[in-house]
Amino acid sequence: MAVRITCINKSGGNHDNPHEAISHYGWLNESSNTSGKDDRQTMVNWIKKGNKACVKDSYGNTAYCEVRKSLKGTEFLQTYADGKYTNNLLNLPECTM
């Protein structure tokens, strides 16, 4: 299964924190037209089970998420595109749901 991440929530809404500060991801399953919002660890575990999540830009380019681990051991998602880790998730709006 694959979902497109459409929004994020961070501690206090601060988008200047590193990727591991993202607390929740809002998503859309474009195949079934279902949506939801899950906490960071739930999404990490879901990706680790072989599922896929991505971010699409306004041009339709897709960057897929991979699980990374901070120096403190915190697992988080970060997009990977064109052979490098990118900040696509940090550019998403705050989830309002």
Image (cartoon, rainbow, N blue to C red):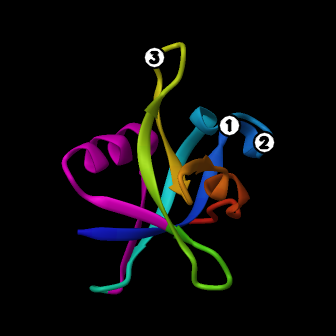
Query: What's the residue type where badge 2 is placed?
Result: Asn
Splitting the image into 4 quarters, where does residue 36 fall? bottom left
Using the image, determine if residue 51 lies above or below residue 42.
below
Residue matched to label 1: 11
Percent x, y of residue 95: 62, 62
Q: Is residue 35 magenta?
A: yes
Left or right placement of residue 30 versus residue 62 in this view:
left
Q: CA distance from mark 3 to mark 1?
A: 18 Å
Horizontal side, residue 3 vs residue 13: left or right:
left
Q: Residue 46 bears which disc, if any?
A: none
At x 27% / y 85%, what residue is drawn?
A: 32
Q: Is residue 46 above or below residue 36?
A: above
Helix, strand or loop at label 3? It is loop
Q: Can you identify the residue that label 2 sits on?
A: 14
Query: Label 3 amino acid?
Result: Gly
Q: Amino acid at mark 1?
A: Ser
**In this figure, which residue is indicated by the disc labeled 3?**
73
Residue 63, magenta (yes or no): no
Callout 1 secondary element: helix
* Drawn side of residue 58 relative to residue 60, left or right: right
Local crowd size for mark 1, using a 10 Å CA cut-off: few (<14), some (14–19), many (≥20): few
**How many C-alpha atoms fall within 10 Å of the one at disc 2: few (<14), some, or many (≥20)?**
few
Q: Position of residue 85 (x, y in %)?
A: 58, 46
Q: Residue at x 37, y 84 (%)?
A: 30
User: Which residue does the image show at 61% across and 55% down from the upper left?
Assistant: 89
Q: Position of residue 22 (x, y in %)?
A: 59, 41
- Horizontally, residue 38 falls left or right of residue 60, namely left
Region rendered in magenta = 33-54
Image quadrant where one finds the C terminus: bottom right
| Marks 3 and 2, how far apart at CA | 21 Å
Image point (38%, 37%), residue name: 41
Quadrant placement of the N terminus: bottom left
